[in-house]
Amino acid sequence: MDPLYDTYIPIFLSRYIESNALIGAIMTLDNVFAIFLIPIFSAISDRTETRIGRRMPFIVTLLPLSAFAFGLIPFAALSSLALLVILIFVFNLFKQSVRGPVVALMPDMVPGEIRSEANGVINTMGGIAAIVGTIGLAQLMNVKLNLSKYGPTDNILAYPFASVLVIIAVILLFFFVKEKKGAHAEKSVEEKIPIIKSLKQIFGEKDKSAFYILLSLLFWFIGYQGVLPFVGKYSVEILKTSSGSAALAAGMVGVAYAIFAIPSGLVAHKYGRKKTIRTSLVGLIIVLVLIFAHSVIFTTEGVSQTLRMFLFWALMFVFGIFWVSVITNSFPMLWQMADYANMGIYTGLYYFFSQLASIVAPPITGGLIDLFGYGALFLFAAACMLVAFFLMSKVTRGEPEDLT
């Protein structure tokens, strides 16, 4: 659902709204929910005990509801701005509530020393999903449906199709993944630690590694989330692609995810997570500057449309290589600082800061586009990656060999 959402929601909104800054602001509505709901539901799931586990009750109820709302979004977009915003609101209410429990499922079951590799597998699956969404399902946006009120209408079919896939995924997860305490869980977890006390312990530690990695991810997500909502619009408005091809730039990131997620976890295990992340941030800065140069040089008159599209896709593919190296290893660094009892709280903190970035970034970058054009988008993202690079130098824990 995510790549389709990020690519086409701004396009749906642009039917009613001209200002990119306002579109960016509306794109943050879901993140306002996320910043509260993900930490809360992650912490609640830490303390949930049922016959089917502590995460699964949230997954089997909230995720199908989010899929149902997602499938209705393009139909709402045909009706009115108000109905579109309401469906975006409902979809994200369910999706953000379930996101923390979903993500916390893996570190519950996998020992800390191999979580980079395990997260690499998860990101590989996410990359395959992004390929399916942006290269496969996105092509369904070109298919016209004969709707009684609107006649032949496109930009619809991918959304309900994706919803069906999500529901199938929930069924598979329920029947084939059985929750259990990982081998690394300590007996002392039976003692419930209050949420507020856990948070005070985390931020009151003498070693501030958790704080600095959270601050680092705030900045690299500001850079990423500032670019992501406008890549589809950039492709359509500047590169003149079709609606079906608008998602291919994000698809290139998905291809990179699928190919390099597992290798990036293995590299981090060998050379260190911190070193891998900082090196990847340097790579992201270079790629974003090159994309800025592309936006200036290769969008002028006389340059082949095919050439400029393929160059942009190639740069987005390289961007994806470095980005997946950051994402694959940052979550395991944070999890390495947690224990079984507060794994969900650490997961919630990760999403609190990443979703805070999602709230802050789109209105800023939308305003930059309105004032200076799309090139400013990529320079702003590069500056954010640079700040994250320096903040990561202060992180001293989170390697595979560190004890939790």
Image (tube, grey):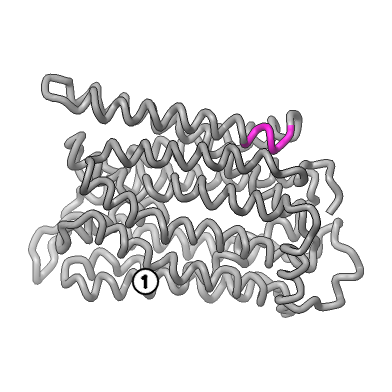
Query: How many neighbours does mark 1 have within 10 angstroms: few (below 14), some (14-19), or many (20 or more)?
Result: many
**Horizontal and vertical percent position of residue 118:** 69, 45
- The location of residue 4, given as percent across then percent down, is 35, 53
Horizontal and vertical percent position of residue 159:
32, 59
- What quarter of the picture does the C terminus occupy? bottom right
Residue in the picture at 60% in, 74% down = 41
Question: What segment is highlighted magenta in the picture?
Answer: 272-277
State the image quarter where residue 67 is shown. bottom left
Asked if 317 appears above or below 345 in the picture, the reply is above
Residue 217 screen position, x and y as percent? 57, 49
- Please name the residue shown 44% across and 65% down the image: 31
Up the image or down, 369 lies above or below 265; here it is below
Residue at the spot 67% in from the left edge and 55% down from the top edge? 211
The answer to whether any part of residue 51 appears in the image is no
Does the segment drawn in magenta span residue 1? no
Q: Is residue 273 visible?
A: yes
- The rendered magenta stretch, by its main secondary structure, is classed as helix
Q: Is residue 377 above or below residue 188?
A: above
Q: Residue at x 49, y 43 (%)?
A: 128
Relative side of 63 to 178, left or right: left
Q: In what element is the residue under mark 1?
A: helix
- Disc 1 designates what residue? 69
